[in-house]
Image (tube, helix red, strand yellow):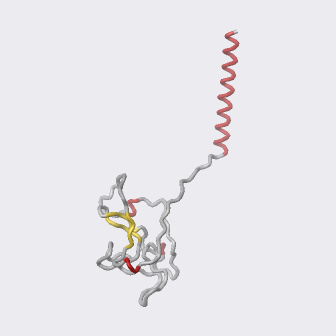
Amino acid sequence: MNAAGIITQTTQPGFSVGQTIAAGSGATRPGQPSGSLLIGNSTLGFFPLFSANAANGLGSANPPTNLSLSGVPLSSIFTNVGFTGIANGTVLQFRINDINSSDNSGQFVISSPPPSTSTPEPSTILGLGVLGLGAFCQRKLSQGKKSKQDN
C-alpha cells in the first residue's frame, strides 16, 4: 500500500491493485483506508496525510508507491470543525490506520526539504555595487572638500 492506503501490489485474493480496504472498528480511523499514513495526536485527532483519490492512485492499475506533499497548509489536513492552528510545542504523531499492526511491513520515509538559499539576480548585485561605489565617491569628495576648508 502507499501512504494513501491504496493497494500497490496484490497480496490477498479479493483485493485489487488501485483499490482501498476500509479499516475495521479497532483502527484509529474506522471506515477510512486501511494502511494509510495518519498524523495527529489524542487531542486533535488523527487525519490522513494523503487522500485516497485518483491523483494518489485510486482506480489505477499502476498506483504510485511514493507520494509527497509540498506547500500544503495544515488546515487542509486537520479537517475537524473549528481547527484554528497548532500551538507551539504541540507534539504530533504518525500512525498507520490499521487494527493489527503486528503484521505490517515496509516503511514510510518522512523528510523535510532543506531550506532554499536564493541567489540574488545579477541586476541586484550590480545595483548594490553601483550604490556602494557612489557612497565611496561621495565620501571621498566630502573628505576632499573638508581638507581644503581646513587649509
Across and down, in percent, residue 76 comes to 39, 62
Q: Residue at x 52, y 80 (%)?
A: 62
Image side of residue 83 versus residue 36, left or right: left
Q: Residue at x 49, y 68 (%)?
A: 109
Q: In the displayed structure, would residue 119 be above or below residue 2?
A: above
| Residue 12 picture quarter | bottom left
Which quadrant would the N terminus be assigned to in this image? bottom left
Which quadrant would the C terminus be assigned to in this image? top right
Q: In the displayed structure, would residue 125 be above or below residue 35?
A: above
Q: In the displayed structure, would residue 75 be above or below residue 139?
A: below
Q: Residue at x 50, y 78 (%)?
A: 63
| Residue 42 picture quarter | bottom left
| Front one among 105 and 120 | 105
Across and down, in percent, residue 131 comes to 65, 33
| Front one among 145 and 97 | 97
Across and down, in percent, residue 45 comes to 31, 65
Image side of residue 117 versus residue 20, left or right: right
Q: In the displayed structure, would residue 12 be above or below residue 137?
A: below
Count the labels in the image.
Answer: 0
> Residue extending furthest bottom?
13
> Residue extending furthest front?
102
| Residue 44 picture quarter | bottom left
